[in-house]
Image (tube, grey):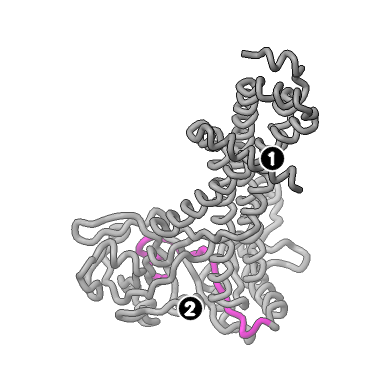
Amino acid sequence: MRRIAENIKVAFKSLFASKLRTFLTMLGIIIGVGAVVAVISVGAGAEVQITENLQSAGTNILTISPGREMPDGAQRAQGMFSDEQEAVAGKLYMQDAYALEESNLLEQVVPVVNIPNGTLSYKSWGGQVSILGTTPQYFEVMDYNVYAGSFFTESEIQGLANVAVIGDNIVDDYFGMVDPIGETIKMGGNNFVVVGVMEEVGTGTFGSNPDNSAYIPVTTGQNKMLGTDTVDSIIAKVKNEQLMDQATAQVTSILQQQHFILPGDPNDFEISSSSQLLEMASSIADTLSITLGGIAAISLLVGGIGIMNIMFVSVTERTREIGIRKAVGAKNRDILIQFITESIVLSFTGGLMGVGFAYLLSWGLQSFTSITSLVTVYPIVLALSFSTAIGLVFGIFPAMRAARLNPIEALRYE
């Protein structure tokens, strides 16, 4: 133990002898560890945020999406599908939502249409926002609240009214000190009157941003902006979590009847529950963290090559010192351990500085962007272990060269 402490002391003394060179050598490790920890932390933060968003909306939510399209070609030619089936296959309609409202297991049924390439302008200001057409129940299901004005009403939906509820960011970006309630904005070439402003929500499910979204009546979105009678999805809130399986079976049965799907035929719609979305979100976040963390780890390997290079230089510069140590009794093993210790100290110190760099990155991301970063112990231990292993692996060859030096030739080295 005493010998190890002495080797570490000698290693630090050697590193401090040339501070700039030591720092430049560690730079690859610092960047590598910082990138690995930051990437994994961003993935962990995204997972936590998605989980909170899904849980805030409730774990008793079913999302129904369109499924397969009607096949063309031989099957159609053979008259395999009736005209009624072809008319509704692979699509969702308001009639589907109305049919689901009859369910005794569902509390809320919400049709949603997404308006692509949403642009919003107010006077001389303009930019991209997310525009969704929906019903007032959407805000109840998602647990969104307004702090000014109100949500649009059923009568405004029936009347295809040009009214909009906007997110908190839109107020900051477009209106400044102006009260947005009653103001007219333009979206997709249509004028809309702002009737409500939502409270700040933060990042929504799968990275969506409700604070930068505008919500309009679903009928207005269908008829005035998209020219369609379909909806992109239907959100259903089940009365309680214990009824999820029964509700899923009932929703499936109702939609099969709506779409004239015979027993044994595949459904042309998909039903996802909150728990499935949560599992999928966690899986995506884990995959992204592993992939990006692996890419970032490559810089650690590059840093390891830099360490090996500088250790070779150190062996050459200290050849005479090695000869003197061997002349007074040092064994090859002592020289080997000394240089391996220096290499490990070099990479571990770089790793510690990299952790500090990761904290700085995380602070910057959270302070200047909407990205959430959660630094945990796991990536720190992982990155420090990896950097230490790199110091060991890339320090072996220079240490072996130092250990094998002939003491007489080493003493003659100038």
In the figure, residue 157 lies in which quadrant? bottom left
Kind of residue sitting beneath label 2: Asp
Range drawn in magenta:
218-241
Q: Nearer the viewer, residue 77 or 232?
A: 232
Q: Is residue 261 left or right of residue 66?
A: right
In the figure, residue 215 lies in which quadrant? bottom left
Along the polypeptide, which appears first: circle 2 or circle 1?
Answer: 1
Q: Quadrant of the C terminus?
A: top right
> Regarding mark 2 in the picture, which secondary structure is present there?
loop
Give the residue furthest to the bottom: 104
User: In the rendered image, which residue does mark 2 sit on?
Assistant: 143
In percent of the image, x 60 and y 22: which residue is there? 317
Distance, label 2 to label 1, CA atoms, is 61 Å
Kind of residue sitting beneath label 1: Asn
User: In the rendered image, which residue does mark 1 sit on?
Assistant: 7
Query: Is 210 a magenta residue?
Result: no
Residue 75 visible in the current orientation:
yes
> Regarding mark 1 in the picture, which secondary structure is present there?
helix
Query: Is 226 a magenta residue?
Result: yes
In percent of the image, x 28 and y 68: which residue is there? 192
Q: Nearer the viewer, residue 220 or 271?
A: 271
In percent of the image, x 44 and y 59: which residue is there? 366
Q: Position of residue 360 (x, y in %)?
A: 46, 53
Q: Nearer the viewer, residue 182 or 362?
A: 362
